[in-house]
Amino acid sequence: MSATLKPLPPGSTLGVLGGGQLGRMWAHEAQRMGYNTAVLDPDAHSPAGLVSHHHIHTDYLDAAGLKQLATTCQAVTTEFENVPADALAQLAASLPVSPAASAVAVAQDRAREKAHFVACGVPVAPHAVIDTAEQLAALLTDTAKADNLLPGILKTSRMGYDGKGQLRVTTRDELNAGWAKLGQVPCVLEKMLPLASECSVIIARGRDGAMVNLPVQRNLHRDGILAVTEVFAGNVPEALAIQAITAAKAVAQELNYVGVLCVEFFVLADGHLVVNEIAPRPHNSGHYSQDACDVSQFELQVRTMADLPLTQPRQHSPAIMLNLLGDLWFTHGDTQTEPAWAQVLALPGTHLHLYGKREARKARKMGHLNITAATPEAARAVALQAAAILGIAAF
Ligand code: ATP
Ligand code: MG
């Protein structure tokens, strides 16, 4: 361990901006390790606020709320991608904040994010930045360039998540109309790539520059939302896994990143790896680590913010994670019914995580189910049984 790390002692209070499920699972880990937690989130019933010692109900940019968080805590992190980078910058004037506002600002803007990947020498999808009507007009006039990016996906540069703020466009006319439809806000047009699969890597980097990673996760998305993550040896070809981990570490290093970072990749039909985007926090695709690894992504977040040493996590069981979306509460029509948890928990190696959200809505992330087993085949068999019980399509 580097001499520069001065760990925060148990009994210290760790804070988080944002009160969603990621904050809740982080709070559980922080508390297990002897820390108190504080959450700043405007929602009185936020999943993380419900389980924390302190819950400050204000807007993210409320000066009094931020001051209260700064005086209550000895270190602060974020769990919410679109938390105003300004709020982090303000807090950083009085206490350690990880990740830094400057790194979060890059992750919040697709154009800056892509420029960062290019600067790191990591391959990205062919794309064009469309900030203004003039830039769009120039692209539409440059027919060779425009046609090379079509069919493509027009994505708002800021505030997108779970496939929101995206439109598929096949022609220049559709591109023109699409930009108007998205509100003429800054966008990135990305070429639609033939994907063989998707994967992601979670990195943790300490204030002393030490880095560790979770194993490469293979992800299945449905309707732009993560549905299934599978993690076991051999699931991603070894050479690709090494490439992904090396790229993720370069992306973190070049940002001088402190905290947990998820880097998402596309594996193309020809076997090439292309980086998609980063999330400056634990990620849905890393939830399996709670039950399948000796150190979870949330413990890594606690360790980085409390200046505790990082050790390389070890996955001890093959794992599959099923996302539990609000749709599962509506498999019997429009009236809400509780999914058959007891039936699922009767299967060996199932670990249920529910986020305490009061209302199920379609496409809303309500929880996840981790399945661990001695072999990938056994994990898969149980996962498919659980999926059938819950009404999740087979994969
Ligand atoms: P997240 O919830 O991960 O933040 P997001 O809204 O930021 O999602 P992206 O990750 O950009 O959206 O895209 C969502 C999904 O759409 C991807 O996981 C992938 O399945 C598909 N997709 C996005 N861009 C492309 C592309 N250029 N070519 C092919 N498929 C794509
Ligand atoms: Mg994504």
Image (tube, rainbow, N blue to C red):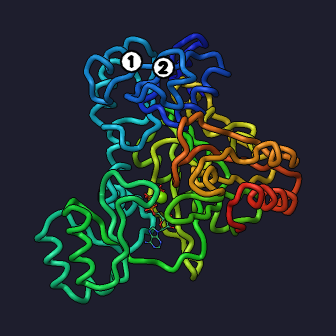
Determine contact: label 2, label 1, CB under 8 Å: yes
Q: Nearer the viewer, residue 342 or 319?
A: 342
Residue type highlighted by circle 2: Ala
Q: Is residue 265 left or right of residue 80?
A: right
Please tell me which of labels 2 and 1 falls first in the chain. Answer: 2
Quarter where residue 76 is shown: top left
Task: Quadrant for the C terminus, please.
Answer: bottom right
Residue type at tag 1: Leu
Q: Secondary structure under badge 1?
A: helix
Residue at 41 percent of width and 25 percent of height: 40
Q: Which residue is mark 2?
A: 38
* Residue 7 pos. (x, y %): 56, 19
Q: Is residue 322 visible?
A: yes
Quadrant housing the N terminus: top right
Task: Tell me the crowding category of disc 1: few under 14, some 14 to 19, or many 20 or more residues within 10 angstroms, Cα based.
Answer: many
Residue 69 — which label?
1
